[in-house]
Amino acid sequence: MKKNYGLIYTIFIFIILFLELGFFNLVQNLNVTLLPIVSILSIIIFLIFLTQPNKKKVPINIKIICILLLILYGMYFFILQKNAFFYSTDLCENIYRYNNIIFIILYCFPLYEAITNSKNNILKMIFNIGMFLVEIRGTVWLLKNFIGITLLPGYFNGTVRSIGTFSLARISVTFIEGFLIVFALNQFLDNSQKNKRYYLFSIIYLYFYAIFVTQTRTELLAFLGTTFLMLFIKFIHSKQRALLIISMVIFITIISFIFRNNINEFIYSFSPQNTTMGISTQARLDGLQNLFEIWNGRQWNGLGFLPDQFLFYNVRYYLSDYGIIVTLLEFGIVGFLITLLPILLGVYYSFKFNSQNKYINYVQGLTIYIIILSVTMNLYWYEFIGILPIYLALIMECIYYNNIEMK
């Protein structure tokens, strides 16, 4: 009996997504508890991929990146962590719990195979799953904040922020929102797409979700940067590019004038002088300064894996607030460069391939999204690393499509 590898990959990938996106966080957050299962499933699907005959050729640079990342984490798991600055037995147990998720990158290869060989459009199916999740989260958010009914408490992170005169509970950001905004924009800007209204609604809803449901300023900036870039790329490749670019500039100018007070308030919210939201900015700056004081003298091998929460001069800091710069502190200069390789590769191919490559828009959009988001959210943190296998799979698909076109 002939194996349907595309179907096998699709089933495994959907199970991984359901686990990692927290569909089972009904009463409490189970994301950390489920990490080992996600890692094991990623390894299994990768082993199945290795046994598949006549599979697509995997680009050597992606192989090298994945091998280097696994070696890097393996070295710190089993060798260098014993010399870490914050070494303790309890910390090591937590480190293994949080960071075994690195194995999730292995499912980028089966996903790469499934993108073209699956009977169904697996990228669209991932989009539908992601939209279903954020719609559920948006619904329980509305019920909690405006009706007082708390359903699915595992989705809430326990923090509350003020928006105008309202104090609203927040729901945590996941990795999937970046893929959702890029996919929706790509479909909306596709001239052959007939269902543009659905994708326009999806884009509007995702902005609502970022502003009110997650209340995450960095994600909102990432959405704006991604939208602007993808619109700009679409315009410069249009036959009426001059008219479209002028229209875009006029539109941005008008919107900026109408909402200038809101824009000024949003920008000022990042300032340490802001008495409300600026406090978090100042706390992050202080924490980074203290961490780099410890890091000096350990620039090459870093501090080792760090606890998410740590006390310094009786002040508690949260490592997940510091973005991808955490990998510089943990792994040192060489390790930091290794963790940047996927992003650098995405930047390289974003410029190399022309607009005729049907997957290049996904890579370009995700690249700018990841770059902006990485300022305050670490790509390798267990809540966000789920975007990495999707990102690598799309880069491989770009390379594969380009090679096919050149033949």
Image (spheres, grey):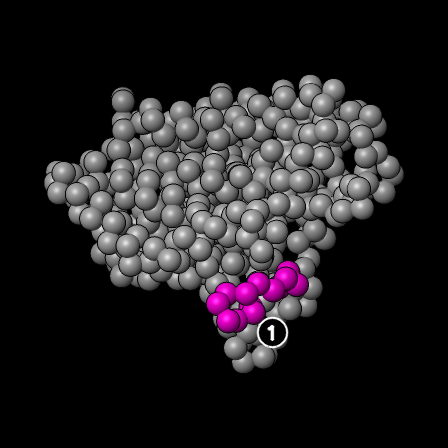
Question: Magenta-highlighted stretch: main secondary structure?
Answer: strand
Q: Position of residue 219 (x, y in %)?
A: 48, 49
Q: Amino acid at mark 1?
A: Leu
Q: Is residue 162 magenta?
A: yes
Compared to residue 140, the image places residue 379 above or below, namely above
- The residue positioned 33% from the left and 24% from the top of the image is 352
Closer to the camera, 287 or 322?
287
Task: Magenta stretch: give its range.
Answer: 156-168
Judging from the image, what secondary structure is the residue with disc 1 in?
loop
Q: Please identify the quarter of the rendering in which residue 147 is found.
A: bottom right
Q: Is residue 151 left or right of residue 92?
A: left
Q: Is residue 373 magenta?
A: no
Residue with the mark numbered 1:
151
Closer to the camera, 188 or 115?
188
Q: Position of residue 291 (x, y in %)?
A: 71, 33
Q: Is residue 149 left or right of residue 59?
A: right
Task: State the residue lying farthest toward the right.
Answer: 89
Q: Please identify the quarter of the rendering in which residue 72 is found.
A: top right
Closer to the camera, 284 or 173?
284
Q: Position of residue 319 (x, y in %)?
A: 68, 42
Q: Position of residue 333 (x, y in %)?
A: 63, 21
Q: Quadrant of the C terminus?
A: top left
Q: Can the viewer see residue 89?
A: yes
- The residue positioned 60% from the left and 33% from the top of the image is 325
Q: Please identify the quarter of the rendering in which residue 340 is found.
A: top right
Q: Can the viewer see residue 8?
A: no
